[in-house]
Image: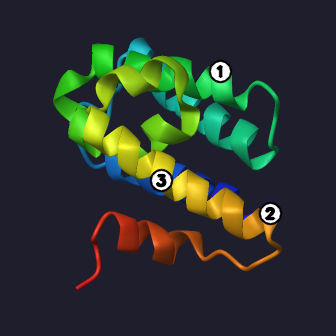
Amino acid sequence: MNQYHEFHVELLKQTYNQLLSHYPFNTEELMIEQQDFLDDFVALIDLCQKQSEDATEKGQHFCTGWVRTYSDLTPLLPRDLLWYFGGDCLHYMPDDEIVQFQYLDEIRHEALSAGKEFDYPSERSRVFKLQH
């Protein structure tokens, strides 16, 4: 698993754990739909860890379902995951954000093609101006 992929798998895990602390997922008795949502989330993490061919399609379906079903919890869904899964997820991203992710992908591919090391988290922070 490469650094780019590891970054997103870890982001999925962190997001899952954050989600568990928010209503309705922090209640003792979950409704069947909520438990199914969490089960789907765990299954998606597993697919991504195994680098399954189905992971992208399942990720798109999961993220768009999250936005539709739990719109109040959409701020917990990292923008990186929308970009990572792509497809219909991109409809929830503004054009300027898409341009930044495209640039990040371009410089990542250029570095890897040239056989250079590419520190994805560091470059991501630089592109999105997350470092001081």
Q: Quickly name the residue at label 1.
A: 57
Q: Nearer the viewer, mark 3 or mark 1?
A: 3
Quote the CA–CA distance across marks 2 and 1. Answer: 26 Å
Q: Position of residue 34 (x, y in %)?
A: 39, 22
Q: Nearer the viewer, residue 35 or 66?
A: 66
Q: Residue at x 66, y 29 (%)?
A: 56
Which amino acid type corresponds to the residue marked 3 in the rendered image? Tyr
Q: Nearer the viewer, mark 2 or mark 1?
A: 2
Mark 3 Cα-neighbour bin, 10 Å: few <14, some 14–19, many ≥20: some
Q: Residue at x 28, y 72 (%)?
A: 130
Q: Nearer the viewer, residue 35 or 101?
A: 101
Q: Is residue 101 above or below residue 115?
A: above
Q: Is residue 78 visible?
A: no
* Quadrant in the picture for residue 117: bottom right
Q: Is residue 67 visible?
A: yes
Q: Position of residue 39 (x, y in %)?
A: 56, 29
Which amino acid type corresponds to the residue marked 1 in the rendered image? Glu
Quote the CA–CA distance across marks 3 and 1. Answer: 23 Å
Query: Mark 3 or mark 2, which has the lower sequence index?
Result: 3
Check contact, mark 3 vs mark 1: CB within 8 A.
no
Q: Which mark is residue 113?
A: 2
Mark 2 Cα-neighbour bin, 10 Å: few <14, some 14–19, many ≥20: few
Quote the CA–CA distance across marks 3 and 2. Answer: 15 Å
Q: Residue at x 41, y 13 (%)?
A: 33
* Quadrant in the picture for residue 128: bottom left
Query: Mark 3 or mark 1, which has the lower sequence index?
Result: 1
Query: Mark 2 or mark 1, which has the lower sequence index?
Result: 1
Which amino acid type corresponds to the residue marked 2 in the rendered image? Ser
Q: Position of residue 95 (x, y in %)?
A: 29, 33
Q: Is residue 46 above or below residue 61?
A: below
Which quarter of the rendered picture does the N terminus lie within? bottom right
Q: Quickly name the residue at label 3.
A: 103
